[in-house]
Amino acid sequence: MNKKYNIGDIHFKTKKELYENYHVDHHNPSFQTLKNNFLQLTKKTIPLSFGDCKKYKLSIFKYEDEDFKNDWVDYHNQNCNFQILCRDCNIRKK
């Protein structure tokens, strides 16, 4: 089976080709605005340190901050809007 991945009329042969060429970006509000608004609203203690995900080389919430993380994920998912940008435009975006 020869699966294709699409964004509108643009077709890619592999997921890697798709992910290397296009990025999902926060749009109206920006990620920075979402984060700032959430931090002003939350009553929970804001984490001051994070764990490391060795597999993806990312910072992650620690187990003891699970309630804060869940509130953040809920807030983010209810208030974010995304747009698809080409890789170069997303990298240049401020």
Image: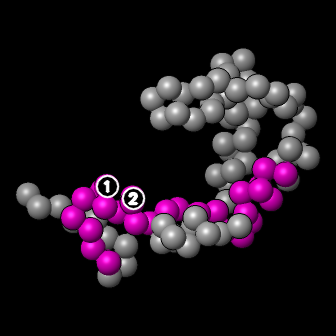
Q: Residue at 73%, 63% (x, y): give it.
A: 30
Query: Does residue 82 show up?
Result: no
Q: Amino acid at mark 2?
A: Tyr
**Residue range of the region highlighted in magenta in the rendering:** 10-36
The question of residue 14 being in magenta is answered with yes
For mark 2, what is the residue?
19
Q: How many marks?
A: 2
Q: Residue at 24%, 59% (x, y): give it.
A: 14
Tell me where residue 73 sits by quadrant: top right
Snapshot colouring: one colour
- Quick check: 22 left or right of 5? right
The question of residue 83 being in magenta is answered with no
Task: Determine whether the residue tagged by mark 2 lies in a helix, strand or loop.
Answer: helix
Instruction: Residue at the far bottom: name it.
Output: 9
Q: Residues within 10 Å of mark 2 (few under 14, many from 20)?
A: few
**60 to 77, vertically: above or below:** above
Q: Residues within 10 Å of mark 1 (few under 14, many from 20)?
A: few
Q: Position of residue 71 (x, y in %)?
A: 73, 38
* Image quadrant containing the C terminus: bottom right
- Distance between mark 1 and mark 2 Cα atoms: 5 Å
Instruction: Residue at the far top: name it.
Output: 64
For mark 1, what is the residue?
16
**4 to 40, vertically: above or below:** below
Q: Are marks 1 and 2 in contact (CB under 8 Å)?
A: yes
Task: Determine whether the residue tagged by mark 1 lies in a helix, strand or loop.
Answer: helix
Q: Residue at 64%, 23% (x, y): give it.
A: 51
Tell me where residue 60 sits by quadrant: top right
Q: Amino acid at mark 1?
A: Lys
